[in-house]
Structure formats: C-alpha cells, structure tokens
C-alpha cells in the first residue's frame, strides 16, 4: 500500500485520562478516508496530532514520510484543513482574507492573483471576492474556507465535519468540490463527519469509540458485516395479533413494534407467502436495504456490549 499518512500505536492522554488509545492505521495516497465516531471519541484529537498542532503522548505518526514530532513545518505545507468552525476574519473581504492566508505560504503578487482567479472560478465565489466574509451564506463561506485550505496546493485535505449546518443543496455543492479535488488532482481526503451518507463512497471507513478503533472497512464491508435488510409489515387496525400468530406458525423470526413488525434478512419466498396468506390483515409494507447508519449503530452497540 502506498500510504501517505501512517499512524502507529498513537496514544494521547490528558493527565491520567486516555482519549486516544494505542491506535494504528494507514491512509492510502489519493484515497477518501472517513473517520467516524460519537462525540468525544477522539477524532479531532487524532486529526490535531496529524496536523502537528498537538503532541501525542506516545506512538509514531508520519505524513508523507515526515515525522510529526520533528518535521512540523514541512508537514504544514503538505496539508490543508477545513475546521468545524469557519476561521476566516468576518470583517475582511474574501479577497483580503485569502491574501493574508496565502502570504503565510509565501504566495504573493501575480502568483496570488493567478491562484485566486483559478480558485474563485473553480469554487464559484468570484462574485463575492470584495464582500466582507460575514456577509456570505453558510455554503458560500464553506467554499471560501476550502479555497483557504487548498490555496497552497496541499497533498492532503483534512475535513473536520465540513458540512455541519449546511442545507442539503450547499452540502451537495461542497461535496462536488471535494470529489473534484480527489478525482482531478489526486488529493487525499481525510474526513470526519456525523452524516454517514457522506462516508458511503469512502475507500476506507474507520470507526472510533472511546479512543479505540472498533471497526474498519469499506462501506459495503461494514454494511454486510453490521447491518441487514429489513422487511416492515404494517397490519390493519386491531389485527396485529393475528398477523403475529401467522408469523409464529410459519416459523418466521420477527421483531414487534407499536404499529408494525420487522423481519430481518427476509427471504423473498417466505415474505411473498406471508403477504399472500395475510393480505386481508395487512395495511402496507416496505423493504429497507441495510444502511451505513444501521451498521454504525450496531458497531457502537457491539462495542458497548463488549465493554460491559
Ligand atoms: N485539552 C483537553 N483537555 C482535556 N481533555 C480534552 C482536551 N481536549 C479534548 N479532550 C477530551 O478528549 C476526548 C476526545 O475529544 P475529541 O475532540 O478528540 O473528540 P471528537 O471525536 O472529535 O468529538 P466530536 O465529534 O464531538 O468533535 C473528549 O472526551 C474531550 O473532552
């Protein structure tokens, strides 16, 4: 594997509290890597160590072959970060903000003008260049924040919940931009998100809980391993017991809820027989494919069960 980030036995402690617990993983060059976990799982801590803004308690981390302990400045040139919160100055214009940020990487004069034009076109914010950052909408601000993060052409883009608070259309637009960066520029994308839908096309998903890696795999692998297809049957009023009796007689395993029953991993054959047999008891039914959301919840549930 051609890895661009390599994390080996990483641990972070605050006093005696371990918040990242001996984790190891690699991120492949050009991949979309998604880092999932509940609040407080240790995602931002890990990202901050990779970005060289926080020191680990122990373990080794390399970014593009550079050691995060000893080659901080070189690493900072290789990475761009979009934080959960916008970091640009509300009272400067978009152009002034980017000029200041670019100057930190030595990008000035004509080189700056050319790159600004390129990014303003690509990320569609040319119209707002002379507006104060505060006057932009949430989606427009995020696009400018992405421009800030990639102004110096980094190899890796770290996105810490980049679309939180955006409406679905703005989220879609931000994702189109991220895909373009991955596909056309081969940029490695390291994502943390609470929207599992966004992680579904990742090359690798890793789930963290209480500082530990509790699952790792592609979206399909995690879905196959931790979620299942479901068939929901909604009985007509007051006949749920009759439907349940029929399912019991047919030896079909199901879960009972207030106004419906769920058959997990249903076989077409058994479900169609039951539907035919009980058509006068059934109000409606639906089939649900196993989802990444289900997988995520089951991964956390199993991890909690193992702890107790
Ligand atoms: N400076 C600090 N001192 C003490 N504890 C801290 C500090 N920073 C973070 N923590 C703790 O470390 C744990 C991991 O926090 P972290 O921010 O990495 O989680 P996260 O997975 O990014 O959560 P979220 O999804 O809410 O952003 C939390 O319990 C947090 O309270």
Image (spheres, rainbow, N blue to C red):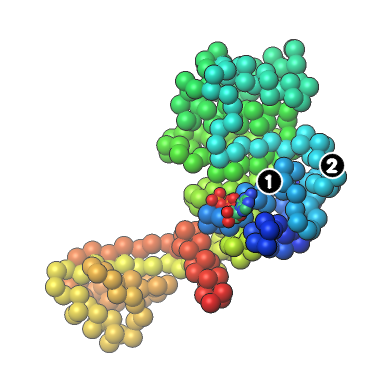
- Ligand 1 within 8 Å, label 1 CB: yes
Residue nearest the observer in this picture, 5 or 10: 10
Q: Is residue 16 visible?
A: yes
In percent of the image, x 49 and y 69: which residue is there?
301
- The number of numbered discs placed on residues in the rendered structure image is 2
The percent position of residue 50, horizontal first and vertical second, equals 73, 47
Residue of label 1: 48
Q: In x, y percent, where is residue 205? A: 61, 56
Q: Which mark is residue 71?
A: 2
Task: Bin the neighbour count of mark 1 within 10 Å (Cα to Cα): few under 14, some 14-19, many 20 and up.
Answer: some
Task: Classify residue 96 by image quadrant.
Answer: top right
> Which element type, helix, strand or loop, lies under badge 1?
helix
In percent of width and height, residue 294 lies at 46, 62
Q: Against 193, is 216 above or below?
A: below
169 is higher (above) or lower (below) than 307: above
**Residue drawn 77% across the image and 34% down it:** 77
Residue beneath the point at 64% across and 59% down? 19
């Amino acid at each position: 594997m051609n890895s661009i980030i390599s994390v080996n036995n990483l641990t972070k402690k605050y006093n005696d509290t371990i918040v990242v617990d001996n984790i190891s993983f690699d991120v492949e060059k050009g991949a979309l890597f998604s880092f999932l976990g509940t609040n407080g799982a240790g995602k931002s801590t890990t990202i901050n160590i990779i970005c060289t803004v926080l020191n680990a308690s122990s373990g080794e981390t390399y970014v593009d072959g550079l050691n995060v302990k000893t080659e901080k400045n070189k690493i900072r040139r290789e990475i761009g970060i979009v934080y959960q919160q916008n970091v640009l100055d509300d009272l400067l214009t978009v152009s002034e903000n980017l000029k200041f940020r670019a100057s930190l990487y030595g990008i000035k004069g004509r080189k700056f003008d050319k790159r600004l034009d390129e990014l303003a076109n690509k990320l569609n914010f040319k119209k707002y260049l002379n507006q104060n950052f505060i006057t932009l909408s949430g989606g427009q601000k995020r696009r400018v924040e992405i421009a800030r993060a990639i102004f110096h052409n980094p190899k890796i883009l770290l996105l810490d919940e980049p679309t939180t608070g955006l409406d679905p259309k703005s989220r879609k637009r931000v994702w189109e931009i991220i895909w373009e960066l991955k596909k056309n520029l081969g940029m490695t994308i390291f994502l943390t998100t609470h929207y599992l839908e966004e992680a579904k096309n990742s090359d690798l998903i890793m789930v963290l809980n209480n500082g530990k890696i509790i699952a790792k795999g592609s979206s399909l692998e995690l879905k196959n391993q931790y979620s299942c297809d479901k068939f929901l049957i909604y009985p007509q009023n007051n006949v749920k017991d009759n439907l349940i009796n029929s399912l019991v007689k047919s030896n079909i395993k199901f879960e009972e809820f207030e106004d419906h029953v769920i058959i997990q991993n249903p076989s077409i054959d058994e479900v169609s027989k039951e539907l035919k047999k009980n058509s006068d008891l059934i109000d409606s039914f639906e089939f649900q494919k196993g989802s990444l959301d289900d997988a995520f919840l089951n991964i956390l549930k199993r991890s909690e069960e193992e702890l107790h």
